[in-house]
Image (tube, rainbow, N blue to C red):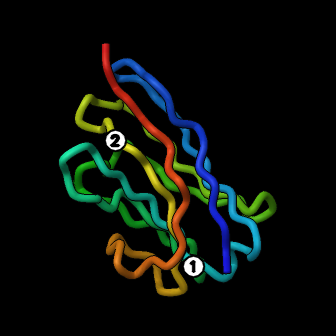
């Protein structure tokens, strides 16, 4: 079992950047692929990015490709989501999640979830 804690959210102006962190405990990231998901009020949860544990291969939703970068620091047992060129439509609660499957953006394949961190993009 793995526990996940997100941090790094906040209020940022359009065009700004934030870096989210997802710290894992109880198990190493060598065992799990990590995904980042987001959910805005009144909208369905959306997969944003994932990184596989076997080969570190990243995968991005089209909506964030070229703006967001997912990375992993095994020594710190932490996965990051660097978000650049943020827009108001990126406003949402962001969650990281862990799966034993290969990295993907299907939330139903993830077994462990953090509590989330709020990202608000507004002028």
Kindly state the secondary structure of the residue where label 1 is placed: loop
Q: Quadrant of the C terminus?
A: top left
Write the residue at 39% across / 58% down: 37
Considering only vertical position in the picture, is 110 above or below 4? below
Write the residue at 66% across / 67% down: 3
Q: Residues within 10 Å of mark 1 (few under 14, many from 20)?
A: few
Q: Where is residue 100 in the image (x, y as percent from the top left)?
A: 54, 86
In the picture, the disc for residue 117 is none
Question: With 83 as the anchor, is 55 left or right in this view?
Answer: right
Question: With 63 as the anchor, is 48 left or right in this view?
Answer: right
Considering only vertical position in the picture, is 47 above or below 41? below
Kindly state the secondary structure of the residue where label 2 is placed: strand
**In the current view of this chain or complex, which residue is farthest to the bottom?**
101
Question: With 46 as the anchor, is 57 left or right in this view?
Answer: right
Write the residue at 46% across / 55% down: 95
Residue at the disc numbered 1: 55
Q: Position of residue 107 (x, y in %)?
A: 35, 72
Give the camera-side residue of 92 and 17. Answer: 92
Residue at the disc numbered 2: 92
Q: Position of residue 114 (x, y in %)?
A: 55, 59
Q: Position of residue 39 (x, y in %)?
A: 31, 51
Give the camera-side residue of 96 and 31. Answer: 96
**In the current view of this chain or complex, which residue is farthest to the right?**
75
Q: Quadrant of the N terminus?
A: bottom right
Nearer the camera: disc 2 or disc 1: 2
Give the camera-side residue of 39 and 90. Answer: 39
User: How far is mark 2 from mark 1, CA to CA?
Assistant: 29 Å
Q: Quadrant of residue 90?
A: top left
Q: Earlier in the sequence, mark 2 or mark 1?
A: 1
Q: Are marks 2 and 1 in contact (CB under 8 Å)?
A: no
């Amino acid at each position: 079992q793995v526990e996940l804690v997100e941090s790094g959210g906040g209020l940022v102006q359009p065009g700004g950047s934030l870096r989210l962190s997802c710290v894992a405990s109880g198990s190493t990231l060598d065992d799990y692929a990590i995904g980042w998901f987001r959910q805005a009020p009144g909208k369905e949860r959306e997969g944003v990015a994932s990184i596989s544990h076997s080969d570190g291969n990243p995968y991005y939703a089209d909506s964030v490709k070229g703006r967001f970068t997912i990375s992993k620091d095994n020594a710190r047992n932490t996965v990051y989501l660097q978000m650049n060129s943020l827009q108001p439509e990126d406003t949402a609660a962001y969650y990281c999640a862990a799966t034993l499957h290969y990295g993907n953006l299907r939330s139903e394949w993830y077994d462990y979830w953090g509590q989330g961190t709020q990202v608000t993009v507004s002028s």
